[in-house]
Amino acid sequence: MTTPETHTRLLKAEALRLGFSACGVSPAEAVGVADRDAFVRWIDEGCHADMGYLAANLDKRLDPTLLVEGARSVVSVALNYFPPRDIPPGEYRLAWYALGEDYHTVMKDKLARLLDYLRTLLPGVSGRAFCDTAPLLERYWAWRGGLGWVGKHTQLILPHAGSAFFLGELVVDCTLTYDTPMPSRCGTCDRCLRACPTGALTRPRHLDARRCLSYLTIENRGEIPPEAASSLGDSIYGCDRCQQACPWMRFARPTDEARLHPRDGLLAMRRADWKRLDVETYRRLFKGSAVKRAKFEGLTRNIRATDNAPMDETDH
């Protein structure tokens, strides 16, 4: 008879075979009191801006057993998206994660295959796969599963690998063996906080989305405030500056997942091309891309906003 230890070992090996960079497991239970209270305060302070979905279904977000009936385990995985090539210096920039295929598609495919594999080990197991698609504190569960720690820039850092990773989960009704959370290795470093051009990182592990360029250029549906627009530099979709400043990123290696590699059409775009972007070109460039989150109107708004933004040498 196989044991939870064997099932866990085989599941982790399969996760790596599927291309995930790391896999860890934690018990499905209510979020710890300190992290729960910190998240509720963050919402109460309005730091989620107008992303109302973050405040919705708060009970489920703080307890995965309410998402999946009978849940016993949370399997967390990380997928590297660090690009092997980047946009040339001096051109408009998009966040690293958005240069390839929509990560939801890539992650859901791999997670579905991982769940199918678990069912070959444990026939009848029930569960659901998630990737930024349900009320779940993904970084918390990745930390609980021992993948890494949440850095001062609020992103999960994998030791000797950096923070350019997508996170996903399986919430399942079987018992597995559980990993130990990893303590922070940030020490006294505050480079990410100092690198944020708008001061959105108001203190370690606290992000005010209302001031964050990623929020303002992606989720935000209004105009970009002039004080934030002046900090855009070359950024027209998202911002990687806190990640770029992190010393752990010196260990980042390009992703092996071809679907996440930058699209040639994007790398070929020049500032003049972006300024005359039309709907047809937008649809061609971003078919099956996460950039569609901002819509054509949002992206062209961002491009217009950079006209009044000085170039930022830290972008290059």
Image (cartoon, helix red, strand yellow):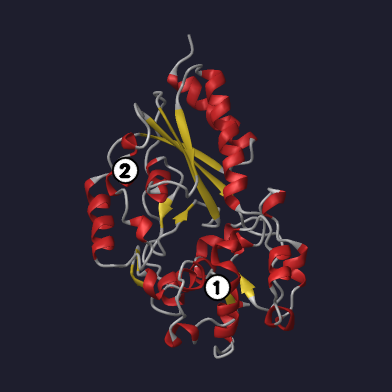
Mark positioned earlier in the residue sequence (1 or 2): 2
Q: Nearer the viewer, mark 1 or mark 2?
A: 1
Identity of the amino acid at label 2?
Answer: Lys
Q: Which mark is residue 298?
A: 1
The residues bearing labels 1 and 2 have C-alpha atoms spaced at a distance of 31 Å
Question: On the picture, is 206 further left or further right than 95?
Answer: left
| Residue 154 falls in image quadrant | bottom left
Pinpoint residue 180: horizontal percent, then vertical percent.
37, 38
Residue at 51 percent of width and 60 percent of height = 248
Residue 29 makes an appearance in the image: yes
Task: Quickly name the residue at label 2.
Answer: 60
| Residue 37 falls in image quadrant | bottom left
- Residues 242 and 29: in front is 29
Residue at 73 percent of width and 84 percent of height = 272
Q: State the SS at label 1.
A: helix
How would you rate the neighbour count of disc 2 (Cα within 10 Å): few for under 14, some for 14-19, many for 20 or more?
A: some
Pinpoint residue 184: horizontal percent, then vertical percent.
37, 54
- Residues 48 and 261: in front is 48
Pinpoint residue 289: horizontal percent, then vertical percent.
64, 58
Question: On the picture, is 276 further left or further right than 147?
Answer: right
Residue at 44 percent of width and 58 percent of height = 155
| Residue 5 falls in image quadrant | top left
Labelled pair 1, 2 in contact (Cβ < 8 Å): no
Identity of the amino acid at label 1?
Answer: Gly
